[in-house]
Image (tube, rainbow, N blue to C red):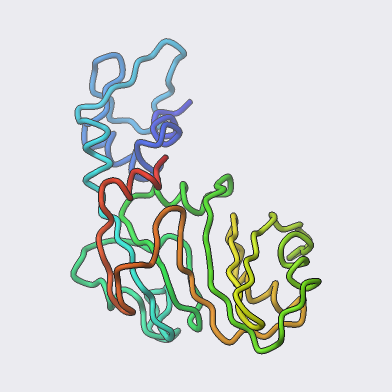
Amino acid sequence: MKLNRYIASIDVASRRGADKLIREGKVLVNKEVEINPAYDLEENDIVNFTFDIDEYKESHIVIKLFKPIGYVVSSNPDEGRPIYNLVKDIGKIYPVGRLDKDSTGLIILTNDGVLHKKIIGAETNLEKEYLVTVVETLKDGALGKLEYGLSLDGVKLKKTVINKINDNSFYIILREGRNRQIRRMCRLVGYNIISLKRIRIGSIFLDGIKEGQFKALTEEEKKSLYN
């Protein structure tokens, strides 16, 4: 296995982050500094680091943002107002996942590529919860289809959890994140969305911040996403 791939596989850094660590001389193979990211590890090779892994992870920036309607998860101003305008004093951080222009709610931004994989990687089962309000009166049959009976692009969707609030609103919990998934699901069962808000990612809630504001995650909150 290549050295950079190994470092990524043990969740120390993303592949790109691993390349950077290696080139900076922060990775040891058999107690010797190795600066070649493509170094081929042998079965008995021992990899160490010149820094504390836990402290390195804690040094990453991770914030939660309450995205308002009209803002886009993009740096292209032609698509709408970029969310980066709301966090421009933080430095280089990137959104984990997306919310479309007409949706609102929780966005996590970070400079840690490993965390991206933990939250939206193909193998993740991390829950994302949304509050949905539709024009039509909700029916049990349609909600049942939203929960476990739909496919998108020819692929069966993972089971969701639906909690009805009233005749027009419900919570939905997803364990995947296809493009505009909830809007497309609702269209398949004849519902037109009035509002869509993401309120939770894993154990991180939207609570405590107002629309357009952001807040750094605590170390405990960060650890909950890594585990």
Task: Name the residue rendered at 40%, 31% in the picture.
Answer: 38
Decide: is 89 above or below 166.
above
- Apparent side of residue 221 relative to residue 180 in the rendered image (left or right): left
Task: Name the residue rendered at 40%, 36% in the picture.
Answer: 11
Task: Name the residue rendered at 26%, 36% in the picture.
Answer: 23
Q: Position of residue 200 (x, y in %)?
A: 45, 62
| Residue 84: quarter of image | bottom left
Q: Position of residue 177 (x, y in %)?
A: 58, 61
Decide: is 20 above or below 131.
above
Q: How many marks?
A: 0
Q: Quadrant of the C terminus?
A: top left
Residue closest to the eye, 149 or 112: 149
Q: Residue furthest top?
A: 44
Task: Name the residue rendered at 40%, 47% in the picture.
Answer: 225
Residue closest to the eye, 168 or 200: 168
Residue closest to the eye, 123 or 17: 123
Q: Position of residue 86 (x, y in %)?
A: 27, 76
Decide: is 220 above or below 179.
above
Decide: is 13 above or below 127.
above
- Apparent side of residue 215 relative to residue 225 in the rendered image (left or right): left
- Apparent side of residue 204 relative to residue 93 in the rendered image (left or right): right
Residue closest to the eye, 104 or 85: 104
Q: Position of residue 78 (x, y in %)?
A: 42, 86
Q: Residue furthest front?
A: 166
